[in-house]
Amino acid sequence: MQCCGTFFWLRFRYFLYACRLLIFRRWQWLLVLSLLLPGHALLTLASIPGRFLNLIVAENIGLTDRVGILLSALMVACLWIIPQTKALRGYDNRSFFSTEPLSKPLLTTITASLILFSDSLFMILALGNPDIYRFDTPNRIALKLFVFVLEALNFVIIQLGVVERHATLIIAPVIAIVPLALSLQKIGSFSTWGFLFISLTIVLSSLLSLSRPITQHNKNQNDARAPGHRNNSLMRNAPPYLRIQIKALTEHFFLLPFIILVSSAILFGTTELLKVFNYDDRTSLTLATGLSVVAMTIGCLYRPLKKSHDHARTFILTMPVKKNYWLFHDIIFVNFLGISIFLAFILPVLIHHHFGFLSFFAFFLYFVSLISTLRITTMVSQRHSVLIAVCICLIWAALITSFLPAGDGT
């Protein structure tokens, strides 16, 4: 027992030593704590507890609830939907979650896949439901053609970075406002003045950014020599990629209102997409939570990182991990964990309202994948991995139970 404790403590000290900086230590602690949440990602905070998503489809939500939705969407946006292209950020192709540069084809593929998924939600949301395929009036035809053109521009111009940032910032607010206006009409009455205020804030913030010069940074330059970093010991001692990320966030702070609206529209679009298939609210919320967990997990923790010789760096660790462990993590995490979430949690609630043999088998795979993922990402012992996995399973059980009405059980 003492030997295991000493070994765990040495591993844990080495884990903290690898962080090197105080900000990394805080982030590491925060990320380790986030593993106790379903999906092992900070992004799942936007869908926990499950009844939070009920505010999106409810028609009698107030100003406080809308503010909560926007704040959670802001958190999701800051970690996931912040623009990743060179045209918007002016830096080399670095992912927000990556510690090493990504190749341009890989970055384009990832961005195109994520944005194609989000834009499909935009289309379902903006085109309307249930008359999604109706073109009986000229106004409806014009509206749907207009939205289709805007979404095409969104995919080509904003995400793939075909044009410069100035043109992007002018077109982006227009594209974001249209789906948001239609989504707000679906959830109930929304203040016209409030919507105009948000729209003007986005437009003014984008136009204000036009006065900023487009600064191209060389990835080999030492940003610590900048005047703004001379008196900042944290920035001076930070590695180059961390300085790039922090500077990118501060310089693009004016994009946050636009990102909030995009995040909100994606959340609205998820529920609208599920309603197209005539799911009730409880089933829609359950599926929306499962989809968000899977999508956010793949987009966050499984974001591909550039390999370096025989080592690769995971999202949580800053130290190298052997290549065979990294590949094993991919197989277990993506395949087993993703399938198990649907089989163990979505289908039982949707069909049988209880856990059967198939659900138990999927749950077992999910449990094993949790232990493997925890051991690889946090370097804790097998005993601690099992304990943490049990806590995660208990939280999942409580989350699924919250979807069921009183009197039913899992």
Image (cartoon, helix red, strand yellow):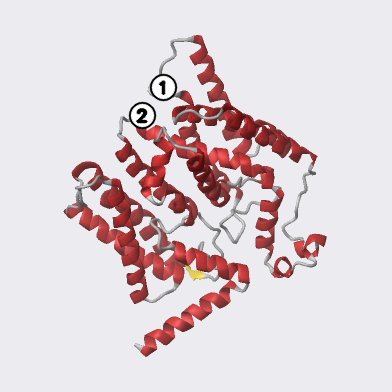
Residue 133 lies, in percent from the top left, at 40, 19
Residue that appears at 51% across and 55% down: 304
Among the 4 quarters of the image, the one containing residue 382? bottom left
Residue that appears at 54% across and 24% down: 147
Q: Which residue is mark 2?
A: 276
Residue 172 lies, in percent from the top left, at 63, 34
Q: Amino acid at mark 2?
A: Val
Is 315 in front, or is 35? Answer: 35
Residue 203 lies, in percent from the top left, at 68, 33
Asked if 194 appears above or below 48 in the picture, the reply is above
Residue farthest bottom in this picture: 2
Is 57 in front, or is 269? Answer: 57
Residue 281 shows which numbered tag?
Answer: none
Asked if 309 appears above or below 356 in the picture, the reply is below
**SS class, disc 1:** loop
93 relative position to 118: left or right: right
Q: Are marks 1 and 2 in contact (CB under 8 Å)?
A: yes
Q: Amino acid at mark 1?
A: Ile
Asked if 145 appears above or below 80 in the picture, the reply is above
Residue 132 shows which numbered tag?
Answer: 1
Instruction: Say whether disc 1 or disc 2 marks the residue closer to the N-terminus.
Output: 1
From where the camera sits, is residue 336 visible?
A: yes
203 relative position to 354: left or right: right
